[in-house]
Image (cartoon, rainbow, N blue to C red):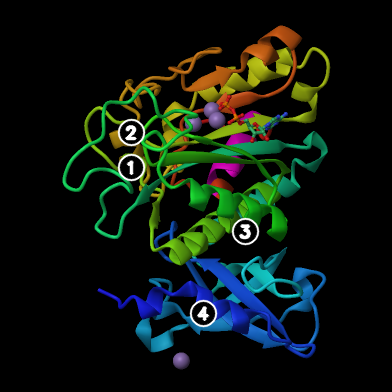
Amino acid sequence: MPSKALLNKAAKTDYMSLETYGKVQAMYIWIDGSGENLRCKTKTVDFEPKQPDDLPLWNFDGSSTKQAEGSNSDCYIKPVALFRDPFRGNPHKLVMCEVLNYKQEPVATNNRRRCRRSEEQVKEDRPWFGMEQEYTLLDVDGHPFGWPKGGFPGPQGPYYCAVGTGNVYGRDIVEAHYKACMFSGVKIAGSNAEVMPAQWEYQVGPCEGIDMGDHLWISRFLLHRVCEDFGIVASFDPKPMKGDWNGAGCHTNYSTESMRNAGGIEAINKAVEKLSKRHFWHIKAYDPQGGKDNLRRLTGLHETASIYDFSSGVANRKASIRIPRHVGEQKCGYLEDRRPSSNCDPYVVSEALVRTTILNEEG
Ligand code: ADP
Ligand code: MN
Ligand code: MN
Ligand code: MN
Ligand code: MN
């Protein structure tokens, strides 16, 4: 166990406000070889970067992140998106990066590069995404935060969108993370307590094209980093507790310009039709284990549709694709793909939607 002294975060605050005399800290952030975990390291630069290209290419030991062989282990990290750093304050930066191999080609897990290529072909369709990130707070022992040790709270029912001690667990983290997102420039849209106690959701969006992935990944970084300050773990596992407890997803709301315009319901229905024809291709793309993670979550129970069937419907929370009631009524808007798991890669999910519904890929 760490000593109490180490956990005294108050002592740190004096140092954090020290003048840095024109030097700027840039926290380079990248996705590691697992496709779901983030890594980061800091570089001092002597100017305030205004765009990602202002910052230099950097490198790291890819053999420590399952991204390279030990004998030829240098990988490159290339800055691709900039955010303000809420932990160090202005003018310091968080820097989303793509990972390149020693030949400066994208590594296998560089899904962003592929996503960007697809989305460049559909710019005129103005694809928007809004993702509902669900997650679970765990104590350091791996049991959900606030649950009785070795036991369970009362059954689900009172916890969704709840208020009050005993109904919600860990709101301090939710509040701190929300403000951290706003400070950094992440387009956070809202938050709510979820059906399982200690499970929460926040939404990011609407974001156009590649921004969706950049903003969601940085929001996850911020959540992990905030949780460090509280000694709590954020889990993106799609089914952290077996049994009669809800899993965690990352519902993806999606529209193109023609869906948003008057009469867009026709374009929405056409997209649903195309999605219905390649359900399993999407399932493979919707979690980092090619569908294995979602097998635990998409059971047909707990507000999910079975992983084996495709379904759609207005206001139907037991369908693969839900058309929100107000969209059905106004006859334009967006659709909600409820299949992506909480640990999905938003670059892969957004690209899959574009490839099926705009680029008309089949099979
Ligand atoms: P739910 O009713 O499923 O819980 P939420 O309110 O949690 O929905 O999330 C809705 C998400 O949809 C938000 O992230 C919002 O930014 C996004 N959104 C709203 N309009 C659009 C649109 N036209 N295209 C894509 N996403 C959208
Ligand atoms: Mn070293
Ligand atoms: Mn929601
Ligand atoms: Mn939810
Ligand atoms: Mn939803």
Which residue is tagged 2?
297
Q: Earlier in the sequence, mark 3 or mark 2?
A: 3
Q: Amino acid at mark 1?
A: Asp
Frontmost of labels 4 and 1 is 4
Query: Where is residue 132 drawn, in percent x and y?
Result: 55, 37
Say left or right for 112 vs 331. Answer: left
Image region (quadrant) for ligand 3: top right
Write down the quadrant of residue 202 in the picture.
top right
Residue 301 among magenta residues: no
SS under mark 1: helix
Q: Is residue 2 visible?
A: yes
Q: Earlier in the sequence, mark 3 or mark 1?
A: 3
Q: Amino acid at mark 3?
A: Arg
Q: Tell me the CA gap for discs 2 and 4.
A: 42 Å
Frontmost of labels 3 and 1 is 1
Which residue is tagged 4?
11
Which residue is tagged 3?
113
| Residue at image location 25% in from the left, 73% down from the top | 1
Which residue is tagged 1?
293
Query: Where is residue 294 drawn, in percent x and y?
Result: 35, 37
Figure disc tally: 4
Q: Earlier in the sequence, mark 3 or mark 4?
A: 4
The magenta segment: 348-357
Q: Earlier in the sequence, mark 4 or mark 1?
A: 4
Q: Tell me the CA gap for discs 4 and 1.
A: 41 Å
Residues marked 1 and 2 touching at CB (< 8 Å): yes
Query: Where is residue 324 drawn, in percent x and y?
Result: 61, 17
Frontmost of labels 3 and 2 is 2
Q: Amino acid at mark 2?
A: Arg
Q: Tell me the CA gap for discs 3 and 4.
A: 42 Å
